[in-house]
Image (spheres, rainbow, N blue to C red):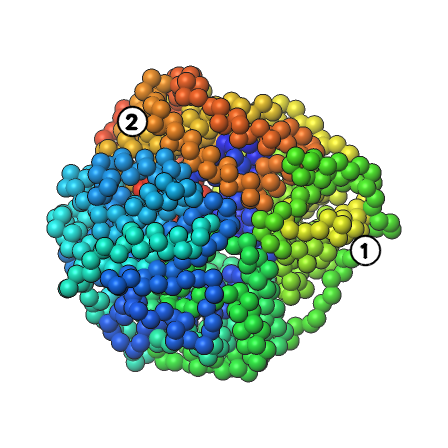
Amino acid sequence: MSGKEEGDTDSGSGGKDPERQSLESSEELGRGDNNVKQSEGAEEGNKKRRNLFLLALVVLVVVVGLVVGLTVGLQNSSTAQSYASDTWPHEISDIPPDPRVRYGNLPNGLRYMIMSNGELPDRLSIRLHIDAGSLHEDDDQQGLAHFLEHMVFEGTRNFEELPELDRETQRIGAHSNAYTSFDETVYFLDLPVENETVSTGFTILRDFADGALFDEDRIEIERGVVLSEDLSGDSVEWRIFLKQTDFLFPDHRLAQRWPIGKKDVIRTAPRQRFVDFYTQYYVPERITVVAVGDMDIDQLEAYIVDSFESMVQPEEAGQDPDMGTVPKDVGFRAAIFTDEEVISEEAWLTTSRPWQFEPDTEASRTKRLPLDLAHYILGRRFEVLAKEEGSPITDGYAVRENLVNLIDWGHVVVTPLEGRWEDAVRVLEQEVRRAIEYGFTSSELNDIKNKATVGYGAAVATADTRESSDLSWDFIDSINERAVFSTPEVDLDFIEKALDSTTPEIVHQAFKNYWQTEDVALFLTTSDERAQTTADELEKLFMDSKEVKVAPPEEGAVISFQYTDFGPSLGTVVSDTLVAELNIRQLILSNNVRVNMKVTDFDQNYVAITARFGTGRLEQPPLPWFDGFAETVVDLGGLGKHSFDEIDSIFSDNSVWNGFYVNKDDFEFSAEIIADDMEPQLQLMAAYMIDPGYREEAVRSYKRDVPSFMNYLQHSLDGAIEYVDEWLWGNDGRFSLPATEEELLSYQGSDVKDWIHPQMTGGYLELSMVGDFDIDTVLPLVLKTFGALPERNLTAKEIGDEARDINFPNPPSYRTFTYTSKIQRAAAIVAFKIPPIKEDIRLSRRINVLADVFSNRIFETLRKSLGESYSPYAYADASTSFNQGYIWAESEGTPQVKAKNSQLIIDIAQNMSVSMTEDEFIRAKKPLQTDHEESRRDNYYWLYNVMWESQQKPWKLDWSRERDADYDSITLEELRVLAAEYLVPSNAVRIDVLPVAKDAGVQEDEGSARDLRQTVELIKGTLSGHTSRSSGRSFTMKEKTRHDKLRLS
């Protein structure tokens, strides 16, 4: 969080919905700039986006996988095929490409894809795609494709000095970053459309391509940074995954060329080996330039031609290496991987073969569709099984992956309940066999057909308001995966025809064809010491399970929604106010429900809705992680007349969904839907307001995850940092952590009902909606749902300071926190106390800018100058609900670094008041101003920063009115004064977090500073740095796993 104007809406760390967690991070690993602060409050609003109406779009990309990803691959060859060719995918396909895209090839072999797009206005997204990654490294270059990407940001032909490139991108209001994967390296810039800015952007992009200097002194400094990045992704799960890939693909290059590389190469590789890779693979024939933005397409093309036509293709460029082989005819294999620190156990059934390339055509898409549907249905079966009483699994899924166009990898995975892995293996075997023997029912198939069709339809509905940045990443996908970039209309037409001709028999046959093979591997990852058995015994367990007969699946019943009548009479409007300058309409209904409505055209045919009520964590019982338990019980508890799974089935043919959150000072139901689905969405949300189910199956779901929660706290750095948060929040019971599993296991659904239900059924309620809808059409729907509810409280409950006061530790102080792990990751943290956000928000805004300047200074000192840290950062976290606030500064690394860097952070801070420069001030302020401009066309800025509690807190309308002018008025001298008051040693709480080899605990320690060498930061599943800055941390229930290192930045 960034301490901006929004109400505090994060909801504690326990029991968070995994989909919500995933949406707090970028769309894909390494995609987007996770570290750039959003406009005031938009960051928190974005965290609240569940995008559940886009569930079908996830199905489209991940499950159905038709448009990109699963339609392309590699010919049956052990040599990688270069995709930088003169032939575009649509030229060998019967699928028509999007006519708005212009494709081009320069004489030197460089290619480009460009599109003129007006959303967002005056913004441009440009990308440089290199068709080379870690797979192309020689043995003595392992890790240099990624290391080299770091060095491109450390000085180029036109920006020779280290800070120049960084400062230039910030000066022009641009966001820049890059990532390296197995088979690609991508650099990206998002910038304003101004003549000088666009010219500078393309100069930077060309410098990325062939202008890197590789200064030897900078290489030496950056070695420690890259090693720190390696450490940032280290975990027990990662180490086990490396063993698993060695087990599965012992003779394939994919298992030998992880992007992070080898430590000894990173430490010792000479400059020439960087230069060799750069000159061999950063060549025109391997480069595709992407540009999408609010510019004339001829101008875009001219910039590309002028910038890149002089680049020379060498006579002897780097070639694609031999990739090795995928095991074939090896039969059944089994393996067990054990470690006491494993946070979540898993049982995998997997099969693999070389990926077979086929051009992206209607025939190839149709061919792959049935298996993807089958995998989705099998995953749904696991979800239902996990909710049953006595189930040995907590989750499960099935998927077919295209591993970088080389390996066709299918796997079915279940997560065992702690101590139940034997039973979970039996479930895994029997459910796969049930699908092979009996296939799938018509009701199961219709469910996924509906979801897929809704997803494609949603893409059509929102097509005209797709943002340029999103489109640019879609282009990158199509380049690397050799997929046709077609229009949403073409895709919808295809999927409707393909699904119409797909029967349960076809889906069944596809599943049998794929999984009836002798080449299957079974492996178990567990912390259970009893699993120290042999692979032969695991295989026997699996084979013995085959003796158990399985029954065919039962056809599902058609269920109608039972909540369409909400009272004897419709509501009426008793007050109607138009806030003209903000175009917000505020209503009070006859039952005292408040309604806020704003019509926008930012996201075509798309509406976001929230219903907020009650007092949230302000009046939460003082129980550890009780907010997370409540979220799970309400979310998964369904309604009195419908289970969660029944609701999912009822609304499978539209975009309707519902999410529940416990926020700092309220509760919230939220949804994001297509405008045509407003009536059923309002019906569902209103039904939750009067008859939530609090079902026991939801309680079971939460309790099954408790062992993983506790393992996370005891064996991960992020878990230990949660104890830091608990301490900074004064060990208040509402923000406390569990000491034992028994605390969490004692919770009952009735506990949640006792706390929430009175507020849910009668408390003050504000319903807010923003998006592309017609008020005259929607208002009658509101009146017959929310307007017909029983009478609510007219005003919100007043909560005094006693409930809001938090006992922040008295500065100056120092404390050490520990956790049990063999992974040597530690953190140095400093928290400087600041005031909470008040109605007069001007002070908080200035502290927010100060925190950005401070974060840049920390980054430049610890990473750029000293090379001791990968991505140190700072951010302001001030509450609007509690009397609490602090500037958090953090740097991660080995245990040897902890005290030195925390002291360095304090040294940097106390010097800010006298040494802060105008240049630093402008570089922090300009990105904020750019983000503020963009936020005016962001529905979530309006929903979560301005509207959603604007009748309870009308000053939030004033915040929006004067925000931009107030930020523009902030001066350097104001920040210097604030730095002298807040960024001083006497106001600092210094914390070190480190691993130990014994039981985790908390230690009081007045110890002296210790030597530091490396610092790291792992942000939301993607490793990102360069010109980016972190605005906060994302907590997850599981240690980061294999995905963290598949794409590095």
> Residue at left 27%, top 26%?
1009
Is there any visible trace of residue 402 in the rendered image? no
Indicate whether 501 appears above or below 966: below
> Residue at left 57%, top 77%?
497
| In the image: residue 563, left or right of residue 631 | right
| In the image: residue 866, left or right of residue 753 | left
Which residue is disc 2 drawn over? Answer: 904
Residue 722: image x %, image y %? 45, 38
So how many labels did they put on this image? 2
Residue 503: image x %, image y %? 57, 80
Q: Dot 1, crowdedness within 10 Å: few (<14), some or many (≥20)?
A: some
Residue 168: image x %, image y %? 32, 37
The CA distance from mark 2 to mark 1 is 63 Å
> Callout 1: helix, strand or loop?
loop
Camera-nearest residue between 233 and 1004? 233
State the image quarter where residue 818 is shown: top left
Indicate whether 193 appears above or below 474: above
Is there any visible trace of residue 771 in the rendered image? yes
Identify residue type, mark 2: Leu
> Residue at left 66%, top 34%?
581
The disc label shown at residue 565, or none: 1
Camera-nearest residue between 571 and 361? 361
